[in-house]
Structure formats: structure tokens, C-alpha cells
Amino acid sequence: MSDSGVFDLDQYLAHIGWERERRADLATLRGVHLAHMRGIPFENLDALRRTAPSLELPDLTAKLLHSRRGGYCYEQNTLLAAALEALGFGVTRLTARVVVGAGRIEDRPRTHMTLLVEVPGDPQPYLADVGFGAIGALLEPVPLVIGVESHDAGRRHRFVHVPHRGPLELWMLEAYVGEKGGGSEGEGGSEGGDGSEGGAWQAQYAFTLEPFERVDFEVINWHIATNPRSPFTQRLFVQRVTADRHLLLHGSLLTETRADGEVSEREVTDEGEARKVLEEEFGIEAPDGMTLLS
């Protein structure tokens, strides 16, 4: 993966609907992040075909901005990182262990891509992530501070430190998930921690602040998209976020979680219905000839 090609910031901002003044400040960071989350769906169609998607910026632009497609974490966060850097932010690429549904942190490899963002003139770094396929995902960046609850566009997040054997501090992102809150990135959910109103604080993923390079994500991307044991090669996983709902198609199960917490589910019964749901509900056109439901 290289920086070949010129990133067109105008096209990106037009696609996600960001029309406000372009400044490297916190308001812009939050606004662009939220607009990206609502403007580009999460999907694993390439990995479902055992094909590693390109992470080259021209290819990402063609797929995520000019086609009726979306992408998963490496695509989404690589695109966001390019946009933020073009706007004047400092961006460090990190890797994380997704721990939703895991018995131990060490049971999961570092396969998720997330971003540490520096705002000029602000001593506080922020975690940004538009590529986490979960109802516990960030909608807006949150400050990297221990013990402070953040409210990002209606969701609640916090960080805790977790003991481990490494020399670097291990950060855990937790989300406050309602009683029917679900899993992430193809894995089942499990609640933990203290909570109220029928919900709980749920660990999402763990990471250190060690920088990872673009070439590292080439290897991780290939592994996740081609390994037959990867959850992304086994079943369909598509997500879309709007102002009033979170929509998830996991395998054949379509789950809608509304802003008021109401959850509804239904089974998608055949290939024709799956294609129709992708097009009408997610704005995604699946490649011809591929099997969507296993």
C-alpha cells in the first residue's frame, strides 16, 4: 500500500455530505467522523469471496466513493486517515484486539485498525474509528483519557487500562450497550461491568499506542480477507448507521436498533431478498454471481 495517486478531498467531503468550513479543529474532526459513519456503509463482500480488497487510495476512492459499495475497517479507516491528513490533522495508525465475545484478550490477534488523531493546538489526542462493525462503535472521536465517560452522538464510551505482560499501557475501549446490544465484527456479544437501565459497559477492543505502518495493514488485510477461519470469510456482515437507527445484516439475520433502544429482527430468507435488502436498506450493489447467504 502506498500513497500513489492524489487524494481528492473535495470528492470525499461531497460524498459524505460535509459542507462546513474546513479547519483542523475538534469540531471538524467530530463532524467529518460522524458524516463518514453515516455516509459509507460497512461491508465485507470482498472478504466473503476470499478476495483481499485493495488499500490503495485510488482504489478506495473508486470503491467507497464512486460505487454502490462500502468496506471494512482497513478500507474505511485508511480513507478517513487520508482525509484527516489532508485537512491538517496528525494521524497515527494503531492495531487492536477485538474482544467482544472473547474469553480473554489474548485469545484474539491484533486485526482491527483504529486511529489516534492529534488536533493542532490541542494537547489531548483522540481515538477515531469509522471501521468498527458494531453497535458499540464510535460515532464521533473520543478523547483518550482514562475514567471519563464520553457521549458521542448519543452513544456512550469510556477507556480503562487493562493489566497485561507488555511494556506499553493497554487501553480498552468500552461502550455502554443496552440489554439487547449486539456483537461486533462477526463475533457474538457479551456484557460486563456495571450498568443501569438494563444495559452494561461492554469491552470492545484493546490496543496500545504503538504506531503501525501502511505495509503492516497489507499483511493483516490479506490474512483477514483470505483465511478460511476469519469471521469475515464465513458470513455476510453489513452495517449502516443513520441519525435514527443502526442496521445490521449478519448472515441472514437483519437487526434494526432504533435510537430509542427498540430492537427488531427478521430473517432474510433467500438470495434475491438479500440483494434487495442490500440495495434498498444499505445502498450496496453486490457483485454479480456471488453467493450472499451461506
Image: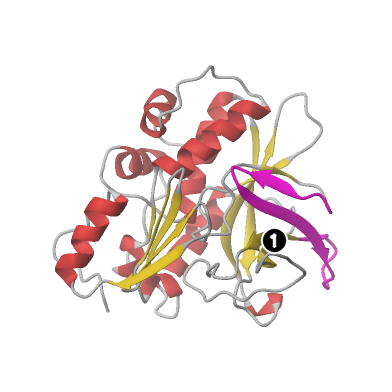
Asked if the stretch drawn in magenta spans residue 240, the answer is no
Q: Residue at x 35, y 50 (%)?
A: 70
Taking depth in this image into account, of 57 and 44 the one nearest to the observer is 44
Q: Residue at x 52, y 76 (%)?
A: 188
Taking depth in this image into account, of 181 and 124 the one nearest to the observer is 181
Q: Is residue 252 above or below residue 160?
A: below
Residue 79 showing in the rendered view:
no
The magenta segment:
146-171
Taking depth in this image into account, of 36 and 207 the one nearest to the observer is 36
Would you call the spot at circle 1 few (<14 residues within 10 Å), some (14-19), or many (20 or more)? many
Q: Is residue 258 above or below residue 127?
A: below
Q: Which quadrant would the C terminus be assigned to in this image?
A: bottom left
Which residue does the numbered mark 1 point to in the structure image?
A: 174
Q: Residue 111 lies in what quarter of the image?
A: bottom right
Q: Is residue 34 above or below residue 74?
A: above
Q: Is residue 63 above or below residue 290?
A: above
Residue 28 showing in the rendered view:
yes
Asked if the stretch drawn in magenta spans residue 150, the answer is yes
Q: Residue at x 14, y 60 (%)?
A: 288
Q: Residue 11 lies in what quarter of the image?
A: top left
Q: Residue at x 66, y 67 (%)?
A: 199
Residue 141 is situated, as x and y percent measured from the top left of the image, at: 64, 42
What is the secondary structure assignment of the residue under circle 1?
Answer: strand
The three-letter code of the residue at mark 1 reads Glu
